Image: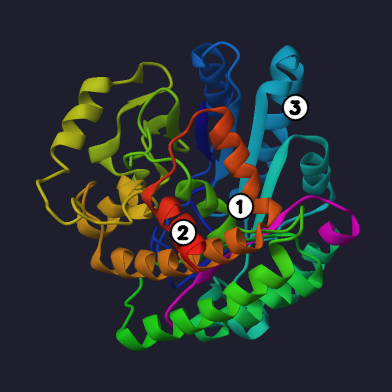
């Protein structure tokens, strides 16, 4: 089960690229709603499955009291279920303190700090509500995590106005000792041929960095490559995620259920609450009203690895349709595919273990390789 629980609607930053917009609600999750949400997860979780609990905002640590209380509630009421929980949270890092760090260290926790790079880059888009510069505060907390050997990563957003600094900032974090670097292209941005060209150039630099400094390691991750590796192996049709099912849903601060954070608090996508459960008919009706016939992705060669064929609710936020990605998403994904193909080809030629282990998995499980991987192998044989 994957459940996202919205701790706080508000945020202490006003990031220019935030898909939730600048003006946010200020509601926070109340303790009784948090209790109901945990109870609902335990009662509806299929036997022997993990519960992946994502703590969301706004900025989730604006509701730090409930953040801390949540772990106490699980410990006290569901001690025997404690080990089935896997926690995730993305925070801007301003409100991290020793209590939060202790929770992260002592639980099965994936923590990401949302930060775009050095101070120059951060301050391009990540402004605070009170106009105070919090970058030094964030970095003190980042170094507290590093010095305390806390497992965490950074989450960068690559935008039209910071793309020229992308490679520089990946190295900035890597040289700082951060092992997990997650970067996301801003699909909501107004990309131009010029900025897309800059992205392509930056990815050329990152290709070489990944091959020389990351590919041979066991503990460093760069998501734009590592999380795409497996998509190149299995021959499979692209599938959208299961958002809106009992195995994948989002709960807002009032205890109402939505399929995904992208449509949180959108009345059209309110599909139930913690008392009544998920109303499947309402979900199905909303889906039917949010798709239309399109040839756009039908013959696309990269649909198997494209986010536009996996994240329907991101599509909906941009185009109004679950099944139709934006032209920007298509352009960004084609750039990423070209670089993934290049890097995987090099990894195959060099027989880098990070890649080759997947061939063993495919063989043991009798998995047919994708056309892209077959093409990579054929090209290597013919050289």
Report the label total. 3
Residue 309 locus on image (x, y percent): 31, 48
The image's mark for residue 72 is 3
Q: Which residue reaches farthest bottom?
A: 194
| Quarter of the rendering containing residue 104 | top right
Horizontal side of residue 249 vs 321, given as left or right: right
Q: Secondary structure at mark 3?
A: helix
Residue 36 locus on image (x, y percent): 53, 21
Of label 1 and label 2, which has the lower sequence position? 1
Give me the residue at 66% from left, 69% from top.
211
Q: Is residue 22 magenta?
A: no
Q: Is residue 342 above or below residue 258?
A: below
Label 1, residues with CA under 10 Å away: few <14, some 14-19, many ≥20: many
Q: Is residue 319 above or below residue 242?
A: below
The image's mark for residue 90 is 1
Q: Which residues are magenta?
A: 145-161
Of label 3 and label 1, which has the lower sequence position? 3
1 or 2: mark nearer the eye: 2
Q: Secondary structure at mark 1?
A: strand
Q: Is residue 365 above or below residue 329?
A: above
Label 2, residues with CA under 10 Å away: few <14, some 14-19, many ≥20: some
- What residue sits right under mark 2 in the picture? 376
Task: Examine the rendering and report whether any part of residue 162 can be seen.
Answer: no
| Quarter of the rendering containing residue 81 | top right
């Amino acid at each position: 089960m994957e459940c996202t629980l919205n701790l706080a609607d508000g945020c202490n930053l006003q990031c220019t690229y935030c898909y939730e917009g600048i003006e946010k609600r200020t509601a926070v999750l109340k303790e009784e709603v948090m209790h109901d949400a945990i109870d609902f997860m335990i009662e509806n979780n299929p036997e022997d499955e993990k519960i992946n609990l994502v703590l969301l905002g706004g900025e989730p640590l604006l509701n730090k009291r409930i953040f801390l209380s949540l772990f106490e509630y699980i410990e006290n009421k569901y001690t025997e279920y404690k080990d089935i929980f896997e926690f995730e949270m993305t925070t801007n890092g301003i409100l991290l303190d020793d209590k939060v760090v202790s929770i992260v260290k002592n639980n099965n926790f994936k923590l990401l700090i949302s930060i775009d790079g050095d101070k120059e880059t951060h301050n391009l888009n990540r402004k605070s509500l009170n106009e105070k510069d919090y970058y030094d505060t964030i970095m003190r907390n980042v170094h507290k995590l590093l010095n305390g050997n806390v497992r965490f990563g950074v989450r960068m957003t690559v935008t039209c106005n910071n793309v020229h600094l992308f490679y520089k900032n990946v190295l900035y974090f890597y040289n700082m000792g951060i092992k997990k670097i997650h970067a996301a292209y801003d699909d909501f941005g107004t990309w131009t041929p010029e900025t897309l060209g800059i992205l392509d150039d930056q990815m050329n630099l990152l290709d070489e960095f990944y091959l020389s400094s990351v590919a041979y390691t066991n503990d460093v991750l760069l998501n734009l490559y590592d999380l795409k590796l497996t998509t190149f192996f299995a021959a499979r049709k692209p599938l959208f995620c299961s958002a809106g099912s009992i195995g994948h849903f989002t709960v807002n601060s009032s205890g109402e259920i939505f399929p995904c954070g992208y449509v949180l608090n959108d009345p059209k996508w309110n599909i139930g609450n913690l008392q009544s459960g998920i109303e499947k008919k309402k979900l199905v009706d909303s889906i039917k009203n949010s798709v239309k016939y399109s040839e756009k992705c039908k013959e696309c060669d990269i649909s198997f690895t494209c986010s536009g064929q996996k994240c329907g609710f991101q599509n909906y936020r941009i185009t109004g349709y679950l099944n139709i990605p934006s032209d920007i998403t298509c352009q960004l994904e084609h750039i990423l595919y070209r670089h993934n193909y290049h890097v995987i080809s090099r990894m195959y030629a060099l027989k880098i273990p990070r890649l080759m282990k997947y061939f063993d998995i495919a063989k043991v499980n009798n998995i047919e390789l994708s056309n892209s991987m077959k093409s990579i192998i054929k090209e290597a044989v013919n050289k």
